[in-house]
Amino acid sequence: MTVVRLLLQLRSLGVEIRVEQGKLRYSGPPGVLVGELLDRVRENRAAIIAFLLESDGVEHTTRHIPVRDGTLLALDLFRPRREGVTVTGALPVLWCLERYGRPGRPDQESRLDTHPWLRRVIAAGYVIASVDARGTGDSTGERALEFGPAELLDTYDVTEWLAEQSFCDGNVGMFGDSYSAVVQLLAASVAPPHLKAIFPQMAMHDAYAFLYPGGVFRHDFARRWNEMVDELQNRARSEDARPARGILSQSSALPFRDSVDEDSGVRLFEELSPARFAERISRSGIAICHLSGWYDMWVRDALTWFTNLSNPQRIIVGAWCHNDRSGIDLADEHIRWFDHWLRGVDHGLMDGPAIRYATIGRPRGDWRTATHWPLPDVVPYVLYLHAAPAGMRGGALSSSPAVDAAPSDRYAVDYSTTSGRRSRWANGYLTYGFGDERFGYDIPLDRPGLLYTTPPLPVDMTVTGHPVVTLVVSSTHDDGDFFVYLEEVDALGQPHYVTEGVLRASHRAEEPSPHAFMGLPYHPGTQASVAPLNGRPAVLRFDLHPTSKLFPKGSRIRLVVTCCDRDNAETPMVTPAPVIDLYCREPFLSMISLPVERRAFRAGGG
């Protein structure tokens, strides 16, 4: 048995072999590496060590490849080397289409610098390719639109070009995160014959729901992302590259889901949103492993993809923001996924539950699994908002509706209110060397807003799923933005961000969703559906981004309501500032419904 075949057999059994300080180390499930198999490893110890030490060798070449309209796309190719010689046999190829330059960020030389875990993938017998998207980096061509029709065809052409090369065995996969993740799903929609599997990390589903969540424009993301890609374009070396129109000017002119782009005459959010390709992606049958994080800006999107697609699928959701993957071995995850779909190595990858997720507040590495989303073993735990007593700063959250409390809380909109510059939204563009990439919400104890807090919890309580809030409001103005934050207040009284949601009052209309939406309120966001407030109480019902969060015994659950998030969303300023009433007593009950683990509900319920 050759060393390569032996290592592949060990990998299929879940055994990891590595060299540390010149010695062979291995780990795996108990009872596997025993008997004859262990004897073979010992007999081949020297050859295995030599092979693993040589496997870090990589051949890196660069070239341009043509696509059907004559555009030339710049491509970096990484092939494994053994004993100083490039492996000449045909291998599976994994590739990514990169919007931000082939290295993945401008201050690095190659993809292997920004993603060092790819070296292990290459050592496992894969060829890696990284390609500049048309009109970026060293590629020629015009970017008429982000995620435009030409880019979809490029993914088809590159996949099939790679499959035809002598270094490829005809099996092709795709990898990458953020923009490169969305492109993988679009590639599946055009179904290149040799594309067998993809591994999108942090992928968007609905472009309108992202740029205009609840009808509120994420102007800061659009502006900062626009600045970032403009700077990258200025560094581009291809004189034939023609950039797309700036996303800020384009999206700011499209306030409704059915708004028409004046340049193209197209309803861009309806025609180009990745969501519209779901049926075609399902028909492709391409295997998909989604990865997201509870603090990512697109975590609901990942779960929506998973819910709407019929492909062979797995999903991993960690306690991560957009640029964090701590606590997971990305090389191992990719090798196992692509070994299964591109090499036919059967190690039970698809036998267990399809969902693997972490819970915020539990030890790192304490992964949980589930077969369906939303989880079947949760119950809605409703907490009602109680208005603050006279002279008090905050009101209460209780499992019983208010009876004797004031009927409403009154709040004058404060346009200085912000959730800060290190939010999940800012983290989405601070990932490529263009700013502080740290994630975290700095929550001042005296921040503006309406606060509602439970008593200390009598038991641990785990919330996993999509919280849904109902606010009954009126205003002195005919519209308003309502931001809701779910927080944990620890035993020392310090609040900690968990998740959030937003809805503009005029966008409160609900309709059946055009896709499976996990039982959540769906707001169409069309121009015809918008209705102003009229001075009377109006019901706003919307979801917060999904989470899995352990609220420990003794902590408290807090809901914060504000009407502005200056650094992350564009709220029109009105003079004088509107005054809103938030109703908290029959017949107008404001509340939040939390998806709580059933056993916690029974133990501490309410």
Image (cartoon, grey):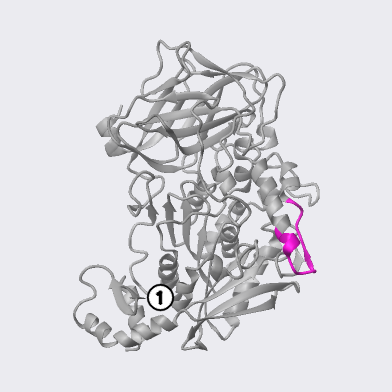
Quadrant containing the C terminus in the rendered view: top left
Q: In this rendering, is residue 320 above or below 529?
A: below
- To which quarter of the image does residue 454 belong? top left
What number of labels is visible?
Answer: 1
Q: Residues within 10 Å of mark 1 (few under 14, many from 20)?
A: few
Q: In this rendering, is residue 200 above or below 37?
A: above
Report the residue at 63% width, 73% height from top: 158
Report the residue at 57% width, 52% height from top: 204
Check the image and name the residue furthest to the front: 21
**Does 346 appear in magenta?**
no
The magenta span reads 232-246
Percent position (x, y) of residue 519?
Answer: 47, 40
Report the residue at 67% width, 35% height from top: 570
Taking depth in this image into account, of 504 and 444 the one nearest to the observer is 444
Taking depth in this image into account, of 512 and 588 the one nearest to the observer is 588
- For this view, does 128 lie left or right of residue 530? left
- To which quarter of the image does residue 213 belong? top right
Q: In this rendering, is residue 335 above or below 493?
A: below
Q: Which type of secondary structure does the marked residue at label 1 adopt?
A: loop
User: Please, what is the dominant secondary structure of the magenta stretch?
Assistant: loop
Quadrant containing the N terminus in the rendered view: bottom left
Q: Is residue 509 visible?
A: no
Q: Is residue 466 visible?
A: yes
Disc 1: which residue: 344
Q: Amino acid at mark 1?
A: Gly
Report the residue at 56% width, 48% height from top: 427
Taking depth in this image into account, of 578 and 584 the one nearest to the observer is 578
- For this view, does 35 lie left or right of residue 151? left
Percent position (x, y) of residue 210?
Answer: 60, 45
Percent position (x, y) of residue 216?
Answer: 64, 36
Percent position (x, y) of residue 116?
Answer: 50, 68
